[in-house]
Image: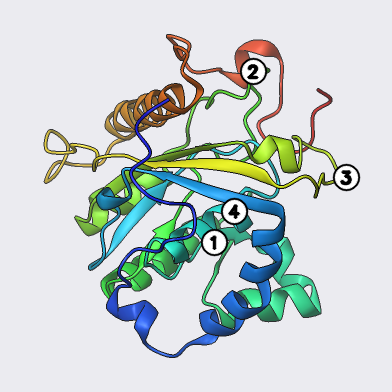
Amino acid sequence: MPHDTSSANATAKPGSEKRRPSFFWVLAVLILPLLSLVIRFRFHHRERMPQTGAFVLAPNHYSEIDPVVMGAAAWKLGRAPRFLAKASLFKNPVVGWFLRTSGQIPVERTGSNGHQALRAAEELVEKGRMVIVYPEGSLTRDPDLWPMRGKTGAVRIALERDIPIVPAAHWGTQAVLPRYSKKPSLFPRKTIDVIIGEPLDLTAYRGKPLDQAMLLKATGELMDAIAGLLAELRDEPAPAERWNPAAHGQKETGRLED
């Protein structure tokens, strides 16, 4: 386990966006006190979280409650979180209102509208905001919850807009809500470890045509970095290769039986 660089309840010095009144303040007042009854954050290398400027935060994904956990973690570390979210969620009158009001970005999984999500994300980064993008696209199919093969959207945003991409990992969420489960375990209180990585070195790719081969190579490096961070939290080596759903006859979206 890596050295714990912070106490559970302390928060980083907020960035300028977090200091400005916004709908995130309402969400923080409503969600954080309840969440703190269920989980305790333990942060590692919190000093790596950029406090100013635009960047992509790319974490692992293995529980449906991950966005709540990582959104709260980002807020505690000083940044207002925004996500790429499934477009279907925006159709719910209540959930959709919360998502739109807090600036979340709808993503169409199929069809021609997927690229529109990338354009919307770029508008956010142009304003110096952070965007949380799950490069796996859905919950990992890896049976041991290691990161699986990634999709290229996170890297594309970082390269097209010439902004940093910061890998991250968390471990412990599965104790609150196991993968695909609908029954959360609220008590006793759980500890969730969150580690922030160094920005991924994309020097070799910047300023060059973004063909699919280049994007896949850079995405592979990103997923290796995320897996490495998770290995630190789990105190065990990550698999040498990322899980490939297609090689195991699996779909990359939708629910799977564990």
Q: Secondary structure at mark 2?
A: loop
Q: Position of residue 231 (x, y in %)?
A: 44, 21
Residue located beneath label 4 in the image: 69
3D distance between C-alphas at marks 1 and 3? 21 Å
Q: Which residue is outermost to the right?
A: 183
Residue located beneath label 1 in the image: 72
- 124 in relation to 173, above or below: below
Residue at 57 percent across and 42 percent down: it is 192
Q: Which image quadrant for residue 55?
A: bottom left
Upstream in the sequence, badge 1 or badge 3?
A: 1
Tell me, yes or no, whether the two marked residues, 4 and 1, touch with CB atoms within 8 Å: yes
Q: Position of residue 36 (x, y in %)?
A: 64, 60
Residue located beneath label 2 in the image: 144
Q: Which residue is outermost to the top?
A: 240
Residue at 61 percent across and 77 percent down: it is 27
Q: How many marks?
A: 4
3D distance between C-alphas at marks 4 and 3? 16 Å
The amino acid sitting under disc 2 is Asp
Q: Secondary structure at mark 1?
A: helix
Residue located beneath label 3 in the image: 183
Q: Position of residue 191 (x, y in %)?
A: 60, 42
Q: Nearer the viewer, residue 137 or 95?
A: 95
In the displayed structure, does residue 126 sit left or right of residue 124?
left
The amino acid sitting under disc 4 is Val
Camera-side mark, 2 or 4:
4
Tell me, yes or no, whether the two marked residues, 2 and 4, touch with CB atoms within 8 Å: no
